[in-house]
Image (spheres, coloured by chain):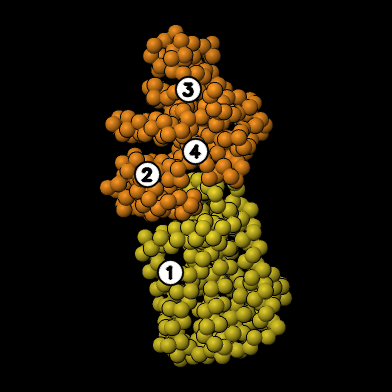
Amino acid sequence: MPAAPSIVVDKLRIRRGGVVVLDEISLSVASGKVTGLLGPSGSGKTTLMRAIVGVQIVESGTITVLGEPAGTPLLRWKVGYMTQNPAVYGDLTARENLRFFARILDAEPENVEDVLETVGLTPFGDRVVNRLSGGQKARVSLATALVGNPQLLVLDEPTVGLDPVLRRDLWRTFNNLAGQGKTLLVSSHVMDEADHCHDLLLLREGTLVATGTPASVREQSGRQDLDEAFLALINEEVA
Amino acid sequence: MSFRATFATAVRVLNQLRRDPRTLALMLGVPVVLVFLLEQLFADNRLIFQRIGGPLLGMFPLIAMFLVTSITMLRERVSGTLERLMALPLAKLDILAGYAIAFGLVAAVQAILVSTVAFGFLGLDTKGPSWAIVLLAISNAILGMALGLFVSAFARTEFQAIQFMPALILPQILLCGLFTPRSQMAGWMRHLSDVLPFTYAYDALHRATALGVFDGRFVLDLAVTVGVTVLCLALGASTLRRRTG
C-alpha cells in the first residue's frame, strides 16, 4: 500500500494584490518521491510553495502537510524551504550562514559540512556569500534548506542559472534524498528537467493543466518531447 | 521563544558586525571623536562641557543603534531572509531578543569606551557613579534599537530608512532639554517634549550625571524609557508577519 501523500491541497484559492493567482486548485504530492512543479513564469508556482510552507495568506481552501495544516509550528522543523531568490546573509560566509540555520533547527554541527559537500561548496565554505557567483549563492541557499535534514523539501527553482554538470549532480542528489524516504517538491520553468522527476504538476495561470508521471504526460499530449508536450497542453487549454 | 534560537540570532548578528569592521570602527570611534571635539569646543567654558558631556555619552548608543537596526531590519525584509526566518522554528521574540543581545553588547562596548575616554582623559565629572551612565547608555541603546526596528516597517529603501533619523531623532534631541532646559521652552514645545521618549532618557542621564540624585522622578524616567522600549518592540514584532500576501 502506498504511503499517505506528504502534501494534500484542496480547492486552494489565493489572491495577491487583487488578482487571483491560484484558482481553487487541488493536488497531492506523493511521499518519498521527487515531484516537479512546472509552468511558465507567473503561473503561480512560487505562491503555491509559499502557501505550502505557511508564509502565504490564503483566501480559501486547505493545505495539509505531513498530516498537519500548513503553517503549523511543528512543521517548521520538518519542512525545508529554498526561496527563489537566495535568502542568505550576503555579509556572512557560507559556513556561517549554515551554522546559523543549523543552530535554529537544532541540527548536528556535522550537517553543515555534509550539506556543503552535497551542494559542492566545500572549497568555498569560508568565502563571504556576496563574493560567490550567482550559482554558488543559490547553492548556499539550497544548503540552508537541507541542513536541518527535513522530511519534506520545498525547493523553488533550485537549478536555475546553474551549469549542466551541476544541474545533473543536483538532480541526482534530489533522487538520492527521495531514495532515503524524503519527499521533494521542486519547481522549474525549464521543461527538460521534468524527466528527472517521478511525478509532474503542470501549472498555467493558477490552474493545474496536467499531472502524472513524465510518461503519462507524454501520453496525454501525444508528444514525445516533454517541452513540446507542455506547449501542446498549455495551448490546448488556451484554445 | 527559545534560548537556542535567540542565541543563534545573536551570534549571527554579531558575526555580521564582525564581518563589517568599518561599520564597527565607525560605531565605536565616532562617539569618542565627537566627545573630544565637544571638550575642545568648550575648552574655555568647562561648565557647558560638564553639563552636556555626561548625557551625551548616554545618547550616542541610542542614535547608533537606531540607525544600525533600522537598516539591518530593512535588509532582512527586502532580501527575503525575513520570509525565510518565518518558515523556521523561531519566534518573532527570538529575532528581537537576538538583535537586542547583540546590539546591547556593542552598545555596552561603545558606552564603556567613550566613558573611559571622557572620564579618564577629558576630565568629565559626574555626580553619580560612572557605571550608572553605562547602564543608562545600554538601556538607551535598546530603546534606539526598538525605535529603529519599528520604523523599518515604514521604509521601503535604505534612503527612506536613513531619513527617519533627522525626522524622528533630531527633533527629540532638540527638545529633550539638552540644549535648553525644558522650563525655558515655550509652552507648546514643553508639552510636545512631555510626550517624546528622549525627554525621559535625557532626564535620567541628567539626574545621574549633573545632579547625582536617583529620586522618584529618576525612577519615572526609567519606567518611561523601558515602557516605550517594550511598546516599540511589541509594535515592531507586530510588523514581522509570519504570513504575507
Provide the secondary structure element on which disc 3 rests: strand
Chain hosting mark 2: A
Q: Nearer the viewer, mark 2 or mark 4?
A: 4
Q: Is residue B116 visible?
A: yes
Q: Quadrant of residue B196?
A: bottom right
Q: Nearer the viewer, mark 1 or mark 4?
A: 4
Picture coordinates of residue B10, whole percent (x, y)? 48, 61
Q: CA distance from mark 3 to mark 4?
A: 20 Å
Around disc 2, counting alpha carbons within 10 Å, would you say few (fewer than 14), some (14 to 19), or many (20 or more)? many
Q: Do the residues bearing badges 2 and 4 touch, measured as CB atoms within 8 Å?
A: no
Q: Earlier in the sequence, mark 2 or mark 4?
A: 2
As drawn, the label of residue A115 is 2
Q: Which residue is mark 4?
A: A151
The chain that appears orange in the image is: A
Q: Amino acid at mark 2?
A: Val
As drawn, the label of residue B27 is 1
Q: Amino acid at mark 4?
A: Gln
Q: Quadrant of residue B175?
A: bottom right
Q: Please state if A69 lies on the left or on the right of B101 as rendered.
A: right
Q: Which residue is mark 3?
A: A200
Count up the numbered dots. 4
Q: Nearer the viewer, mark 2 or mark 1?
A: 2
Q: Earlier in the sequence, mark 3 or mark 2?
A: 2
Q: Name the foreground residue: A137 vs A3.
A: A3
The chain that appears yellow in the image is: B
